[in-house]
Image (cartoon, coloured by chain):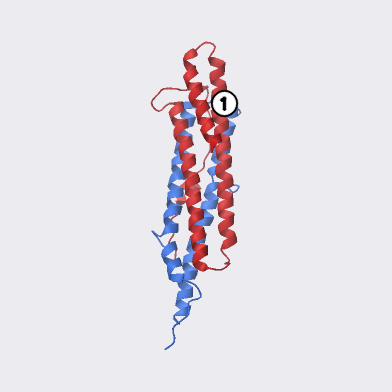
């Protein structure tokens, strides 16, 4: 019986992208720190702020939140893209392994 | 099958600043303005570190595939966009620190105890620009 030639090391990709794998861990840590950063922005607002929504300080906080938010390419939108990519790589590697094994 | 973790509730949460009726600069030692700004600066650096770590994981994956894949462009775009956003966030954060400095400068004529606050805010901005 011949040895199946792997097109690439999909077993390593599966381990890497699976729950608890290196990629998953890095993405989780980023999300935890983004949550913590948002909370810190809120605390900063409590102890240093201007009047109303037209002050320069308010506008800077607003821009800060937009950068880490979900709209207009904000950080959380990109995190979602990273999440989708991880799932895609994992599932494609599983499928490639299945096909190579003739399942 | 979904294997990755994604904080859906956090992602959907609206992130907007509060509006207040008065100006506040609270420089209490414990949990006050200086303390929170300092913690925020450190957390921004931590997020930068996370983005660098994610970039390293992507490079490792590229090495496992050992050839150009359909994922390469997406990975590069993710890192590029994340880096752009955190650098912009840091800029806006520095603007907030500068605004705090201006507020202190205005009040220092009547309250010289604010001088040490100004020094700490200066070092916060210097630490950021030194990187």
Which one is in front, A5 or B4?
A5
Visible residue check, residue A43: no
Question: Chain coloured red: which letter?
Answer: B
Helix, strand or loop at label 1? It is: helix
Q: Is residue B31 left or right of residue B75?
A: left
Which residue corresponds to mark 1? B99
For the point 43% across and 26% down, which residue is it? B32
For the point 44% across and 44% down, which residue is it? A33
For the point 52% across and 49% down, which residue is it? A76
Chain A colour is blue
Among all residues in the image, which is located at the extreme top?
Answer: B110
Residue B28: percent from the left, percent from the top? Answer: 41, 22
Among all residues in the image, which is located at the extreme front?
Answer: B130
Visible residue check, residue B84: yes
Q: Is residue B79 left or right of residue A28?
A: right
For the point 50% across and 48% down, which residue is it? B12
Mark 1 crowdedness (10 Å alpha carbons): few <14, some 14-19, many ≥20: some
Among all residues in the image, which is located at the extreme bottom?
Answer: A1
Which one is in front, B82 or A69?
B82
Residue A100: percent from the left, percent from the top? Answer: 47, 79
Residue A68: percent from the left, percent from the top? Answer: 53, 43
């Amino acid at each position: 019986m011949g040895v199946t030639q792997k097109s690439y090391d999909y077993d390593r990709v599966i381990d890497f992208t699976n729950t608890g794998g290196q990629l998953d861990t890095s993405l989780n840590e980023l999300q935890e720190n983004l949550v913590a950063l948002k909370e810190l922005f809120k605390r900063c607002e409590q102890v240093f702020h201007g009047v109303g929504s037209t002050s320069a300080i308010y506008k800077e906080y607003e821009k800060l939140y937009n950068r880490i938010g979900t709209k207009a390419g904000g950080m959380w939108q990109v995190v979602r893209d990273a999440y989708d990519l991880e799932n895609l790589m994992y599932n494609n590697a599983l499928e490639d392994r299945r096909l190579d094994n003739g399942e | 099958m979904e294997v990755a973790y994604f904080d859906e509730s956090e992602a959907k949460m609206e992130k907007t600043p509060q509006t207040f009726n008065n100006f506040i600069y609270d420089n209490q030692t414990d949990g006050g303005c200086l303390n929170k700004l300092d913690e925020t600066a450190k957390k921004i650096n931590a997020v930068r570190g996370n983005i660098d770590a994610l970039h390293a994981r992507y490079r490792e994956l590229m090495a496992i595939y050992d050839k150009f894949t359909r994922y390469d462009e997406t990975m590069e775009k993710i890192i590029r966009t994340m880096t752009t956003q955190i650098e912009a966030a840091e800029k806006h954060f520095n603007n907030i620190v500068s605004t705090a400095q201006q507020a202190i400068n205005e009040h220092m004529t009547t309250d010289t105890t604010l001088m040490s606050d100004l020094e700490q805010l200066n070092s916060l901005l210097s630490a950021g620009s030194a990187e």
